[in-house]
Image (cartoon, rainbow, N blue to C red):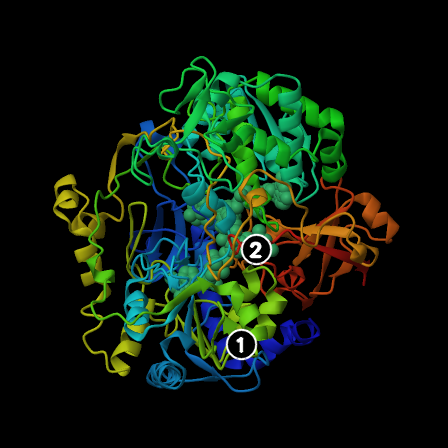
Amino acid sequence: MDKSSKKLTRRSFLATTALAAGALATATAAGCSSVDESGAGATSAETDTAAPEESYFVGTCHGNCGGRCALKATVRDGKVVSTLPMDYTKENEGLRVGCVKGVSNPLRIYGPSRLLYPMKRAGERGSGEWEQISWDEAIELFANQLKTTMETYGGEANMWQGGAGNMNGVLNGTPTGIINSALLPTGEIKPLDGFSKGYANSRLIQKTGGTVLSVGHDMAGIVFAFVHLTQPRSAVEDLANAKTIVSWGANPAEASFCRAAWNWVCKGRENGAKLITIDPLFTSTAAHSDEWLPVRTGTDAALMCGMIHYIVDNDLADWDYVKNGSVAPFLIDETGAYLRLSNFGKAEAGADDDVPVVWDEDAGEFVAHTEAVNPAIRGTFDAEGTSVRTVFDAAMENIAPFTVEFAAEECGISVEQIENLARTCATEGPTSFYINYGLEHTYESWRIYFLIGLLASLTHSVGIPGGSHVGSIGLGHESATTIKQPKTFNADGFVVEDAVPGNHFTGDWIVQIAETGQWAGKDFHMGTLVNMCANPLDNFSGSSALLKAYDKIDYIITIDSIMTTTAHYSDLVLPTCMPWETYEYIDGGIFEQKAIEPVGDAKSDFDIIKSVAVKMGYDDLIEGEGLDFLRSYLDTPENIEAGVGFDALYENGVVVGDYSMPATVVPEYNPYGRTQFYMEYLMPRDAWGQVFGLQDRLPFYKPSIEAYADNPDREKYPLYGFSNHDLYHGQTLWVHNEWLNTFRTIEGKPFCRMHPEVAEARGIKTGDKVRVFNDHGSCVLNALVTEGIRNDSLWLPHGFTWDEFEEGYAQSLTRWCPDDVTSNNNFNDWICQVEKV
Ligand SMILES: Nc1nc2c(c(=O)[nH]1)N[C@H]1C(S)=C(S)[C@@H](COP(=O)(O)OP(=O)(O)OC[C@H]3O[C@@H](n4cnc5c(=O)[nH]c(N)nc54)[C@H](O)[C@@H]3O)O[C@H]1N2
Ligand SMILES: Nc1nc2c(c(=O)[nH]1)N[C@H]1C(S)=C(S)[C@@H](COP(=O)(O)OP(=O)(O)OC[C@H]3O[C@@H](n4cnc5c(=O)[nH]c(N)nc54)[C@H](O)[C@@H]3O)O[C@H]1N2
Ligand code: SF4
Ligand SMILES: [Mo]
């Protein structure tokens, strides 16, 4: 911590990047003129001349906002002067999406933190002393580093950290995986590949047997909702059919993976739905809600347990759905294995027809769940000498300690509030639980997906109009659009015939490797770290721990378009293109058109990696230009026939078609066709031999790892810290952005939010300069005193780089704590103290 707070000063960056600063003067001037031209008034030069020539190009914002709005850039005199949502036909005007961040793209392209030249470190890491170098030298350094590391330690010592920077780009993005490795029956751990994005680097990593470092953010939700419990997500349009909408750890008015979500929440309200928001912060969504339940961070699983007890105890459940639509009646033995037809010799073990059986109360015997008329959901039975009980009983026993009273204490809301919530969800349905990422950014948050499965079963919030339970997790496309989607892709280019097996795990584990020198029980040397589309030090949780781990890495290369905190701590930084400076295809039907020459000496990721490959002697590894790959990727016969082949996309950016509605109500699609809240096996995202007991495969509540009430450290750090995503922030893509700063700063400085009771006890007023600190890190920023936050919590912004704070930086306060199941990043699981400076 001391290390980071000492070095991370704005001065050290500004004073030592004179060469960048020189170039900034030009860039900023260009940026300013674009501000004027887009509406605030014309520059004097222009008032004297006729209207300048304009041209238009389609692109979208990189980064993981999930919006993927098609934005139309206007280019004048070789500069992007505005980026506005694309026009739609009049009848589809309501589908025009975009946001204030998207509009501020010109300030990203010509912004003050833009990287302009390749630079190598001149002083010690993080000193901010740089030497500008040529691309030839940069490529040579990069290639030699990879080569020497391979020769000395093996290919896996070259690590490629993926991130959300160009999450959806197939040409210039980074690879990352969902399940990174598997434990084979032989006991061997097999890394699984994740090469679906980032064509050029995917090929180089495979050729050189490198290590893919997957992202840890959002992984509890993605792993459980997609892979483990396969929870169906209805289209956001279906929110219009709900009678109760619970916005839970979500803020659809401001952030979501679907820009249209809020429109449909509003539509639901117009149709009479009640909106309830569960959030420690009074967000825009909360402000529009009928009720705001300000729970303490990390306690949602306890709240779910309390609700489940209330619904069951008061007989408010839709028992018919619980019996026939969920896994509640499935029977498990003491090891947790399902009782199946094969147990009765009626199917071959493991065969497709070896389905779980239930106890049919009408028939008075065990029958295949698919045949049962009246399955028992409670009870213990003897199955030819084996004692089995229902999954429902096992689940209720597992959560028995977490009563309504327990939940009230834990969550910091009243028993009455919990009971009302449970009653409303159960009796005033259909209920849509709009669960998003706020509540999964705490330790072991994967447990909530078991609980929401059970809660949704009891309230029948699944597979019916208006009843659903997984917000916009992983969503993005599943809302109506007029953008025509390509039908198929030719991903052959990602396959390298003579690939060398490499490694693959969540990047956050480098902290453990730095301590032990091992990964999954084997020695692991951290030779090179290439950050590409990733900004771990500003965005990953526990950035102070990551920074410490960087000391054990021989060489750090960051390819980015801006000087992030991560770039600041690198040995070599390479400037890459922003949208509109190069070509890219973005999943979702958007072809980014090249509109301008890159600012400074920036090159596309494709060109950088291709040059490195050639320098390493792999002349034919990456053939042709980026556009050649995109042509082969998109030009399938199906796409050409549908009018969305390469030429159509290259010409138009997006092809607008008819309003196309996604599958509105999505039923369960797992092999049982039933809502799951139990798993026979729990496969970890990163395998190193973990085994999980029955308790972990059922609904359960465990308190946060740091932000729990009885943590003795709360004497020093009494406040629960958290952050969020909102209209004016979006990870590091929107740093140093003057337009956005007018909305998200106080007197030009980032601010934290605290309750008046917290402020008064410390003599703090809005606008005061304060220091927030804990054992991980600290930062100095301004205070905003507001009733719109719990009186035991403190909100820090996310989405500023270190040099935007007077001292320290916000991310340094977060805790490093990936869990054993999903390696999830836990941004909201830390405690802190605040004082007036
Ligand atoms: N405290 C706190 N921290 C959080 C969160 C929070 O709520 N609170 N949220 C977390 C979440 S949910 C997420 S998804 C993460 C995201 O964190 P990251 O995965 O780091 O993603 P981004 O900041 O979107 O992008 C990373 C970098 O990629 C760069 N980039 C953009 N386009 C390109 C490109 O084409 N090529 C290259 N080479 N680079 C590019 C950007 O400039 C940026 O610096 O942040 C997390 N961090
Ligand atoms: N405008 C905008 N949109 C975005 C992004 C962005 O940065 N800006 N980022 C995109 C990305 S990568 C993601 S992951 C999503 C994230 O978007 P969301 O899923 O909405 O995530 P957050 O904003 O982090 O959290 C949602 C709400 O949960 C609250 N919260 C925090 N901790 C808890 C908790 O323990 N329990 C409960 N009940 N609530 C809690 C927060 O205060 C916040 O208001 O948005 C995507 N869309
Ligand atoms: S930041 Fe996201 S929502 Fe906003 S315009 Fe860009 S892509 Fe759309
Ligand atoms: Mo995210």
- Helix, strand or loop under label 1: loop
> Disc 1 marks which amino acid?
Gly
Q: Residues within 10 Å of mark 2 (few under 14, many from 20)?
A: many
- Helix, strand or loop under label 2: loop
Nearest the viewer among 447 and 467 is 447
In the picture of the structure, the residue carrying the numbered disc 1 is 517
Is the residue at mark 1 in contact range of ligand 1, meaning its CB lies under 8 Å from it?
no
Indicate the quadrant where residue 273 lies.
Answer: top right
> Disc 2 marks which amino acid?
Asp
Q: Residues within 10 Å of mark 1 (few under 14, many from 20)?
A: some
Q: Which residue is drawn at 58% across and 37% down?
A: 699
Question: 417 left or right of 459?
Answer: right
Question: 492 left or right of 37?
Answer: left
Q: Note whether 746 is above or below 571 in the view shown.
A: above
Residue 141 point in image, percent of width and height:
38, 85
> Which residue is farthest front?
385
Question: 336 left or right of 203?
Answer: right
Q: Residue at x 67, y 61 (%)?
A: 813
Residue 98 point in image, percent of width and height:
43, 43
Image mark for residue 819 = 2
Residue 9 point in image, percent of width and height:
65, 73
